[in-house]
Amino acid sequence: MAEQNYYYGTGKRKTAIAQVRIYPGQGQITINEKPIGEVFPRSALQSVILEPMKLTSMANKFNIVAKVHGGGVTSQAGAMRHGIARALLVSDVNLRPVLKQNKMLTRDDRIKESKKYGLKRARRAKQYTKR
């Protein structure tokens, strides 16, 4: 059976899901078969995605290939960050203290609250009038 030459991590935030594979390489990043600049043109989102790589000094040691779907662009960037951190952890267990200290391994579980019956939204009720 062929040996696996990549490390896998799944990242989630809100409704966004990122399936991340990291391969040994020079630091190329492909998201949904497109370069990172095309999918995330804002540099702030790119720095969020690359944060786990910079913290662990692995920026030019792995190529990243990811599939991202659901949510908005900020949520997708957060999911990518989570997935990359998990994949790095699979590649080297000694990175755990650094990633955990910077809260890269914790899933951000804040999601939209569901609508309640009798209300307009989750907590928004009809306006009260005295008369």
Image (cartoon, rainbow, N blue to C red):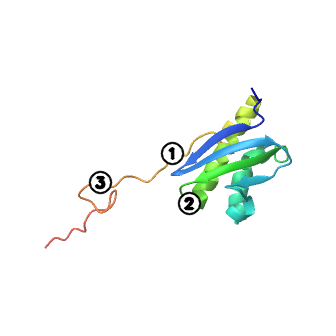
Give amino acid for label 2: Gly
For marks 1 and 2, the one nearer the N-term is 2
Residue bearing mark 1:
109
Front position in the image: 106 or 66: 66
Dot 2 alpha-carbon crowd within 10 angstroms: few under 14, some 14 to 19, many 20 or more: few
Under tag 3, what secondary structure? loop
The three-letter amino acid code for the residue at tag 3 is Lys
Q: Is mark 1 on a helix, strand or loop?
A: loop
Whichever of callouts 3 and 2 sits on the residue coming sooner in the sequence is 2
Q: Tell me the kind of residue under disc 1.
A: Asp
Question: Who is closer to the viewer here, 61 or 56?
Answer: 61
On the image, the x and y values in percent for residue 128 come to 21, 68
Q: Which mark is residue 116?
A: 3
Compute the Cα span from label 1 to label 2: 15 Å
Disc number at residue 78?
none
Judge the density around disc 3: few (<14), some (14-19), many (≥20) Cα neighbours within 10 Å.
few
Tell me whether the residue at label 1 lies in contact with that at label 2, contact meaning CB atoms closer than 8 angstroms.
Answer: no
Q: Which dot, 3 or 2, sits closer to the camera?
A: 2
Q: Distance from label 3 to label 2 (Cα)?
A: 24 Å
From the image, state whether disc 1 or disc 2 is nearer to you.
2
Using the rendered image of the protein, determine whether residue 116 is visible from the camera's viewpoint: yes
Counting from the top left corner in percent of width and height, residue 57 is at 82, 43
Mark seen at residue 72: 2
Pointer 1: residues within 10 angstroms few (<14), some, or many (20+)? few
Q: Residue 125: which quarter of the image?
A: bottom left
Return the residue nearer the eye: 4 or 38: 4
The residue under the point 13% across, 73% down is: 131
**CB contact under 8 Å: marks 1 and 3:** no
**Residue 25, image x, y percentages:** 85, 44
